[in-house]
Image (spheres, grey):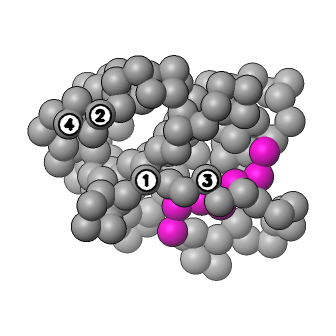
Amino acid sequence: MGFWSLGSIRQPKAQDIKWRKSPRGDYYRLFMIDDVSELKLDGVGGVYILWHGGLQPSWLLAGATEDLGHSFSELMDDPDIREYDSRGHVFMSWSPIVDEFREGVVHFIAKHTNPTFECDFDDREDPIPVLLPR
């Protein structure tokens, strides 16, 4: 079973929410960004996901926010997240999703990826299946 697979979990048809990549087509490395404001995410709401690569890659965290720029700035200052950068770099992506669907998307991601850190979401919202970054 590869890192990106969900194993034997049978999932309903997942939505492609078009996880954002750099202009070069790579996922951004969280700690290689000099200035988050250059991504023009201040005040943009959506869902984000973090993971690390390396020998034993894993999903780290998913979340919903009304301000992706602010959330990424806070994550860059988090020493627990920074610790994973030396284990294969911390990668990030996001998708600008309307407010009414964010909690359901994070619920699905948290339920199906077993992230290292606890994800904050409203578990009363039905999970909304999405394709994960590949």
Residue where numbered disc 1 is placed: 20
Q: Where is the N terminus found, in terms of image quarters?
A: bottom right
Residue in the picture at 28% in, 45% down: 30
Relative to 58, does residue 122 appear above or below in the rendering?
above
Residues in magenta?
A: 128-134
Query: Mark 2: which secondary structure?
Result: loop
Residue where numbered disc 4 is placed: 38
Residue in the picture at 22% in, 30% down: 37
Q: Residue 17 carries which label?
A: 3
Residue where numbered disc 2 is placed: 40
Residue in the picture at 12% in, 39% down: 34
- Report how far apart the C-alphas of labels 1 and 3 lie in the structure: 9 Å
Would you say the residues marked 2 and 4 are in contact, meaning their CB atoms lie under 8 Å apart?
yes
Residue 43 on image: x %, y %? 41, 21
Query: Mark 1: which secondary structure?
Result: loop
Residue 126 on image: x %, y %? 86, 36
Q: Counting other residues with Cα less than 10 Å from the Cα at mark 3, is it few (<14), some (14-19), or many (20 or more)? A: some
- Amino acid type of the residue that numbered disc 2 sits on in the rendered structure: Lys
